[in-house]
Image (cartoon, rainbow, N blue to C red):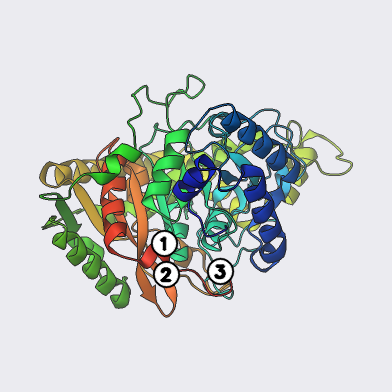
């Protein structure tokens, strides 16, 4: 039963082949048995899951239907869950039980989804390897000596290992797409404003966006349908109708114009990944797509701009963790300054402290113009590059990451080496565009992802292309040995 996708589960539940309660019990047992190898969960919510599963079964028995009714999922541990620890992967929030549900959590629960638990993540979503978590590193089910990517690494490892069919993630600079690529999943970062950020613990508010991680585009469509929509509680949420994503899957790709940026194939890209990307292009050509070389001339400035803007926003957002209102408080403070200093010094790990310092520096008087303002100007140039490209093509295609998953610990002594892995993903966040990563093959037994980017609110187009690709390839069906 653990091999079923969300779409298959929905059919099985509708046909009364099994109940949500039965399925939930199978998956909880599987998590108990296999997760000790992976460390993909921070908290399990068995009681909640079983009561939600029973409630979903009752709703079905009373004639209700819906693709998410009784579907088991998990939430990245930065979505607030009422009465349940919401740690954000940090010692700072180890003792924090959220007083309310994030909009995404509430919407999915209302649709009947069953929450199995909260997944491990990089501390405050800062990282690309899931090694900065206070709860320990997550292992990649494809090779337990390798990282699963981050920051949504717990969600990715759990879904890839078939502990559950799908999970939520968030993507500030790639944290849905990159772990999806490194674990052979399909992951979608929606347009900025498509999914409410209310109750999502903020990292960099102008970049953060929640979205689905699943094995197939079909399942991403189902989960996104439950997450997307206007929320008056989020002032950056956009009041646009939500299309039927599942209905968009079956469009023909005949005549679809795919742009492949020449800058993507520079020296930093593993040539074996380049070859797999070219293979995926050929596959899409067979389905009727037309390929065009394009240029994104300002791409080279994206990493420096992102690693100014994201820490700047983080330094401001994380000032709320002061030892007074939320989370960790030091023992016996002698005065207020001592309380702040020691609570924050003890509560935040080294990567979070590094980002707060970089961000506070970039925002300080005298450096603001040189760093923050400059980075914002680059951000606009990057957006303009995309707008020009989308005048010529319908979709942009390239690698999701320059390398496959690296070994645990390999980049620990050099944070910038890890930052460079984000080169293909962060531009979509800087521009606010939707992006999707899907399985495209393997290098040394480790999965490789191909990334698709589309104009604003064209999530349906991304899902359509990915679904058609998945109907004609079988990379996404491969299962890691031992799981
Ligand atoms: N790796 C990027 C960072 O560390 C992106 C993280 C994310 O998307 N949350 O900032």
Q: Can you tell me whether the CB of the residue at mark 1 lies under 8 Å from the nearest atom of ligand 1?
A: no
Disc 3 to disc 2, C-alpha distance: 11 Å
Q: Which mark is residue 250?
A: none
Disc 1 to disc 2, C-alpha distance: 7 Å
Q: Nearer the viewer, residue 464 or 207?
A: 464
Residue drawn at point x = 89 percent, y = 41 percent? 332
Q: Nearer the viewer, residue 376 or 425?
A: 425
Crowd around label 3: few <14 · some 14–19 · many ≥20 (10 Å): many
| Image position, residue 221 (x, y; %) | 39, 42
Residue holding disc 2: 447
| Image position, residue 208 (x, y; %) | 46, 40
Q: Are marks 1 and 2 in contact (CB under 8 Å)?
A: yes
Q: Residue furthest top?
A: 232
Q: Nearer the viewer, residue 97 or 202?
A: 97
Q: Is residue 373 above or below residue 401?
A: above
Residue holding disc 3: 141
Q: Nearer the viewer, mark 3 or mark 1?
A: 3
Residue drawn at point x = 23 percent, y = 70 percent? 279
Q: Earlier in the sequence, mark 3 or mark 1?
A: 3
Q: Earlier in the sequence, mark 1 or mark 2?
A: 1
| Image position, residue 170 (x, y; %) | 49, 45
Residue holding disc 1: 181
């Amino acid at each position: 039963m653990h091999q079923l996708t969300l779409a298959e589960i929905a059919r099985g539940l509708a046909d009364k082949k099994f109940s949500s309660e039965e399925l939930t019990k199978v998956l909880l047992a599987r998590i108990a048995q296999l997760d000790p190898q992976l460390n993909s969960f921070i908290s399990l919510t068995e009681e909640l899951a079983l009561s939600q599963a029973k409630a979903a079964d009752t709703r079905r028995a009373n004639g209700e239907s819906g693709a998410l009714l009784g579907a088991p999922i998990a939430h990245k541990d930065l979505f607030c869950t009422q009465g349940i620890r919401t740690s954000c992967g940090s010692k700072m929030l180890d003792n924090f039980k959220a007083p309310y549900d994030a909009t995404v959590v509430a919407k999915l629960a209302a649709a009947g989804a069953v929450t199995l638990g909260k997944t491990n993540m990089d501390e405050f979503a800062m990282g690309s390897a899931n090694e900065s978590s206070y709860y320990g590193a997550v292992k990649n089910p494809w090779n337990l000596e390798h990282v699963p990517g981050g920051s949504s690494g717990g969600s990715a490892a759990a879904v890839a290992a078939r502990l559950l069919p799908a999970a939520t993630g968030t993507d500030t600079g790639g944290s849905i797409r990159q772990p999806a690529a490194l674990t052979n999943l399909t992951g979608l970062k929606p347009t900025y404003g498509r999914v409410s950020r209310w109750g999502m613990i903020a990292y960099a508010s102008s970049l953060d966006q929640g979205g689905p991680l699943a094995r197939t585009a079909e399942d991403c469509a189902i989960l996104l349908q439950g997450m997307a929509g206007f929320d008056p509680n989020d002032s950056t949420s956009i009041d646009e109708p939500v299309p039927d994503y599942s209905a968009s899957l079956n469009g023909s790709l005949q005549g679809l114009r795919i742009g492949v940026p020449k800058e993507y194939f520079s020296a930093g890209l593993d040539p074996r990944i380049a070859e797999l990307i070219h293979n995926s292009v050929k596959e899409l050509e067979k389905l009727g797509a037309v390929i065009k070389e394009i240029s994104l001339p300002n791409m080279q400035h994206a990493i420096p701009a992102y690693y100014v803007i994201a820490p700047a926003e983080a330094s401001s957002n994380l000032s709320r963790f002061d030892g007074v209102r939320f989370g960790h408080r030091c023992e016996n403070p002698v005065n207020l300054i001592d309380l702040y200093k020691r609570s924050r010094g003890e509560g935040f790990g080294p990567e979070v402290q590094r980002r707060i310092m970089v961000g506070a520096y970039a925002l300080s008087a005298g450096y603001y113009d040189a760093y923050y303002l400059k980075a914002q100007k680059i951000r606009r140039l990057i957006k303009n590059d995309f707008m020009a490209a989308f005048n010529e093509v319908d979709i942009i295609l390239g690698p999701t990451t320059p390398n496959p998953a690296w070994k645990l610990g390999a980049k620990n002594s050099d944070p910038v080496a890890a930052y460079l892995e984000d080169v293909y993903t962060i531009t979509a966040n800087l521009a606010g565009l939707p992006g999707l990563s899907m399985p495209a093959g393997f290098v040394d037994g480790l999965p490789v992802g191909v990334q698709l980017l589309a104009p604003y609110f064209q999530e349906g187009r991304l899902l359509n292309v990915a679904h058609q690709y998945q109907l004609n390839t079988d990379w996404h069906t491969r299962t890691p040995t031992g799981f």
